[in-house]
Image: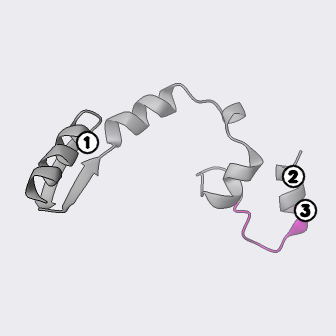
Amino acid sequence: YREASVEVIEVMSRFAVIERASIDEAYMDLTASVQDRLKHMSVQDITPHQLRSTYVQGFPQTGSSDQSEIALLDK
C-alpha cells in the first residue's frame, strides 16, 4: 500500500504541485494549470451546458426558475 501510494504521488507530481497529507491523501495545486488553460480560452469556448453545472463570474446563474435567463443561454 505504501509503495503504491508513492507511485501515485510520483505520477500526480508530473502534473501539479503536490502536498502529501497522509499515506493515502494529497492536495494538488492546480493553479498554474488552470491559469494556463484560461489564457487560451475565450467566451466562445464556454457552452450553455457548462454554465448550467458551473458558476462563471459574469454569466447569469442558471439554477433560477427564470425561463428567460435559460432561453438566453440556449441561443
Question: Nearer the N terminus, badge 1 or badge 2?
Answer: 1
Tell me the residue that label 2 is attached to: 72
Residue 59 x %, y %: 68, 51
Indicate the secondary structure of the residue bearing disc 2: helix
The kind of residue on which mark 1 rests is Met
* Label 3 close to label 2 by CB (< 8 Å): yes
Indicate left or right for 13 with 32 as reference.
Answer: left
The kind of residue on which mark 3 rests is Ser
Residue 28 x %, y %: 27, 49
Tell me the residue that label 1 is attached to: 12
The colour scheme applied to this rendered structure is one colour
Residue 43, placed above or below residue 67:
above
Nearer to us of marks 1 and 2 is: 1
Nearer to us of marks 3 and 1 is: 1
Instruction: Write the residue at 17% across / 44% down.
Output: 7
Of residue 55 and residue 10, the one placed in the foreground of this image is 10
